[in-house]
Image (tube, grey):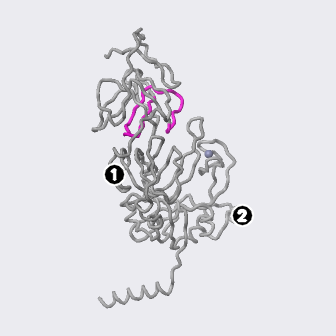
Amino acid sequence: MAILPAQVPAFIGGPVPSGGQAVAAESPIAEPTEIRLKDLRASDAPVQIVARIVSIERREYTRPADGRRRPFLTGLLSDGTASVRFTWWEPPNEEIDRGTIIRAVHAQVREYQGRPEVSFGFRTRVTPAGPADLPKVDSEGFPFRTISELRGRSEGFRLEARVLRVGPKTVTVGAEQRLVYEGLLGDGSGLIAFSSWSDFHLAPGEALRVAGAYVRTFRGRPQLVLDETSLVARIDTRRLPPADQLLTHAPTPLAKLAAAGGSESTVVEGLVVALLPPSGLVYRCPTCRRPVSMGLCPQHGAVKTIADLRARLVLDDGTGTVTMNTDRPTTESLWGVTLDEALDRLRRSPDPSLLESSLAEAVVGMRLRGGGRVFPDDFGLNLYPESVEPIEVDADARARELRARWEATDGVA
Ligand SMILES: [Zn+2]
């Protein structure tokens, strides 16, 4: 059994760890020198780091000593020079949010599958830190990468890309409301979504050199994250293809999209071959917009629901399928029935499945083109389109095509 050194009971607002060991009176321990995440090496010597929490998750394990279920936190830290996984044993009870910057003194470094990881134990003192505490980075030190070369945990690279879209969004970090700037970058090799914790005053069309950003996986796709430590410089706008050329306008084959793991912005086209439940009339929580059954939102409890229309359409283009999720206005226009009319029909014959089959009858067989972000999940590709248009099928042209095929087959036989 290891002899436990003096405790430093100062987690962020956390409980003083129990364990029954006597806390030995000891002269103050020398603080380990602060080091950058890129310089971490597995060692017995504790370290001091400052980093931002990129992702965080609360889990439980069974403590071998007493068989009790105990919580721990795990996730990813980044300081702009590198990102590392962390594990926080006996964490504070309060929620620690993604985006929080922390200083950890007396953290342990281990190696897992060739990469360093840090762990915070009862000796580790974790306190909040600020953006000014994060290391300053220098863009020339980073190797150049194209967007298509970026993967789920890429970091320590330099990138040149054009801003295609950008806009502010309010997020809640702890008790604080923070603005995060979200958008889309393109460089000719591909497109990547980004989110920035810092306002770099980005505008669509600008060409940028970015260094000290990192990549995380968000809803099945890589996303570039910029923060106060990232370096963003405007470069000559002619160094990159024009915005119009960076965005796809022609439909991409679904097999190609499946192989690429989706796309940040693309166009797909296909025949509606099925309507998946839940489609038609749905009821949502007024606060979080989640579909609600029996008037109970999983997050907000009993709520006064609002009626909405949606459709989950399976599009097939001959190479693959995508599930296209349409909102109320699009569903209304494809169906030719408004929400009010659907509610009225339900009052007259209270069977929601009649509405669903009426919607299916209207949309199955339509040829649609949809544009937006395509991302994979366990069931295949998904699209929440920003635009949907029915493609007119020229009946005469189709008949001529069928006849030509039939004659060609006939000629061979
Ligand atoms: Zn809710």
Instruction: State which quadrant residue 411 falls in.
Output: bottom left
Q: Relative to 66, does residue 49 appear above or below in the rendering?
A: below
SS at mark 2? helix
Please give the label number shown on residue 144. Answer: 1
Instruction: Please state the horizontal and vertical placement of residue 27, each as a whole percent of the image.
Output: 40, 10
Q: Residue at the front extreme?
A: 236
From the viewer's perspective, tell me whether residue 398 is left or right of residue 107: right
Q: Is residue 78 visible?
A: no
Q: Residues within 10 Å of mark 1 (few under 14, many from 20)?
A: some
What range of the chain is rendered magenta? 71-99
Q: Which residue is mark 2?
A: 344
Q: Amino acid at mark 1?
A: Phe
Reply yes or no: does residue 208 show up in magenta: no
Q: CA distance from mark 2 to mark 1?
A: 59 Å
Q: Amino acid at mark 2?
A: Asp
Q: Relative to 262, does residue 22 appear above or below in the rendering?
A: above
Please give the label number shown on residue 297. Answer: none
